[in-house]
Amino acid sequence: MAVKIRLSRHGKKGYAFYHIIVADSRSPRDGRFIEKIGTYNPNTNPATIDLDSDKALKWLNNGAQPTDTCRAILSYTGVLLKKHLLGGVKKGAITEEIAEQRLNAWLEEKNAKIQEKKDKIQQEKKAGKKNLLEREAKVSEAKAAIIAKKRIEAAQKEAEAKAAEEADTEIDSATETPSATAEEANA
């Protein structure tokens, strides 16, 4: 029986979520499995990996073969490095303390890189929001300027219309007065 460490797909369409499982290679992808050793969520940035490294190491030492994706996940979390260092301890090349120090140093460096990426993403989000607000403010100012210009033009047109009306009434009243006097004189 060939044992594989592989992914089992869950979640909804377009939003996959995976379980990291140990299963017989002949069983279906989402079918029967021997043990669930973690989860993998590629929808977050950076991807969220929750893995029981002791169980994964135990299965690797027992001969389970990881798929390509699971191998990348195990490498990312440091399980393969731990297996490599423990192989060196078994051969007598290094001591357990040195192996533990190397693993801890690597994990600290890896966690620092991950935190740096998270911080960079947060800063980009803040900068994006700031740029969006600035663009919206510019658009709002432009719209306000256009509205103010239209109001000024409307007020000028209204004033011109009133002036024209007054001029017309003055002309009408001026023409009515002489004609009225002429009519009175004829009468």
Image: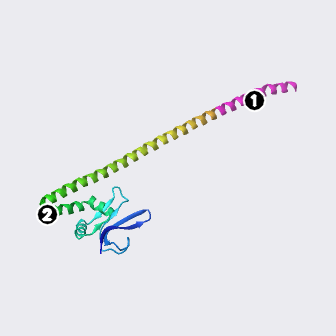
**Residue 35 seen anywhere in this rendered image of the structure:** no
Q: Is residue 158 above or below residue 9?
A: above
> Does the CB distance between marks 2 and 1 fall below 8 Å?
no
Q: Residue at x 44, y 62 (%)?
A: 14
Name the secondary structure under disc 2: helix
Q: Specify how the rendered protein is coloured.
A: rainbow
Label 2 crowd (10 A; few <14 / some 14-19 / many >=20): few
- Quadrant for the N terminus in the image: bottom left
Q: Is residue 51 left or right of residue 28?
A: left
Question: In this view of the protein, which residue sits in the foreground, 75 or 116?
Answer: 75
Precedes in sequence: disc 2 or disc 1: 2
* Quarter of the rendering containing residue 28: bottom left
- Dominant secondary structure of the magenta stretch? helix
Question: In this view of the protein, which residue sits in the foreground, 54 or 165?
Answer: 54
Q: Residue at x 31, y 63 (%)?
A: 70
Name the secondary structure under disc 1: helix
Instruction: Check disc 2 and report the residue beneath it.
Output: 91
Q: Write down the region rendered in magenta.
A: 160-187
